[in-house]
Image (cartoon, rainbow, N blue to C red):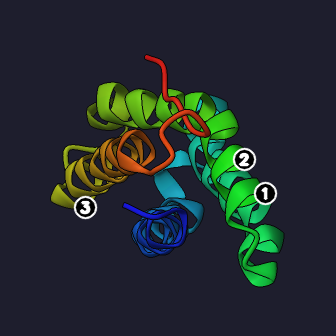
Amino acid sequence: MSPTEAMEIVNTTLSHAWMVRTFLKHAEEIQDDQDMLEVPRMIFDYIRALEPAYERKDTAEYLHRAKGKLPKLRKVAETLAQEHKRISDHTNYAMAAASLTACVRRIEEVLKDVTPAKEIQVTN
């Protein structure tokens, strides 16, 4: 996959993460839980870090930033997946956790498949 295709797929994937962020940002149940509040904050930070490069269509910088910040996004996705039942057993939380996990997984796949592969290497 070309860097441009990769950038577009990651950007579209992040639109789904943004919806998770919006749900969590307005969820009353997490407002006093600092660990859970970190989830929407990190999603916001990740997307905003990539936004200027996307607007300039600078694929190299976009993919570099996507790779560099991915461990933090992965960490909050794991936190949400592990901790959401502590907050609420409502389906909204389960689906938000599944959605964010899927977003991270898709970004990892795209970054591994982009050519030239030497530019972007995702490590777990």
Residue positioned most to the bottom: 55
Q: In screen coordinates, is 119 left or right of 11?
A: right
> Are the residues at dot 3 and dot 1 in contact (C-beta closer than 8 Å)?
no
Give the residue at mark 3.
92
Tell me where residue 21 appears, x and y as whole percent. 53, 62
Tell me where residue 99 appears, x and y as whole percent. 28, 56
First-in-chain label (1 vs 2): 1
Q: Amino acid at mark 3?
A: Asn
Q: CA distance from mark 3 to mark 1?
A: 27 Å
Q: Secondary structure at mark 3?
A: helix
Tell me where residue 119 appears, x and y as whole percent. 61, 39
First-in-chain label (3 vs 1): 1
Residue 32 seen by the camera: no
Q: Which mark is residue 49?
A: 1
In the rendered image, the vertical position of residue 99 relative to residue 38, given as above or below: below
> Are the residues at dot 1 and dot 2 in contact (C-beta closer than 8 Å)?
yes
* Front residue (pair 29, 39): 39
Tell me where residue 77 appears, x and y as whole percent. 43, 37
* Mark toward the viewer: 1 or 2: 2
Q: Residue at x 53, y 72 (%)?
A: 4
Q: Secondary structure at mark 1?
A: helix
Label 3 crowd bin: few (<14), some (14–19), many (20+), radius 10 Å: some
* Mark toward the viewer: 3 or 2: 2
Q: Which mark is residue 65?
A: 2
**Where is residue 57, by image quadrant?**
bottom right
Q: CA distance from mark 3 to mark 2?
A: 30 Å
* Mark toward the viewer: 3 or 1: 1
Q: Residue at x 16, y 57 (%)?
A: 91
Label 2 crowd bin: few (<14), some (14–19), many (20+), radius 10 Å: some
Q: Quadrant of the N terminus?
A: bottom left
Q: Amino acid at mark 2?
A: Arg
Q: Secondary structure at mark 2?
A: helix
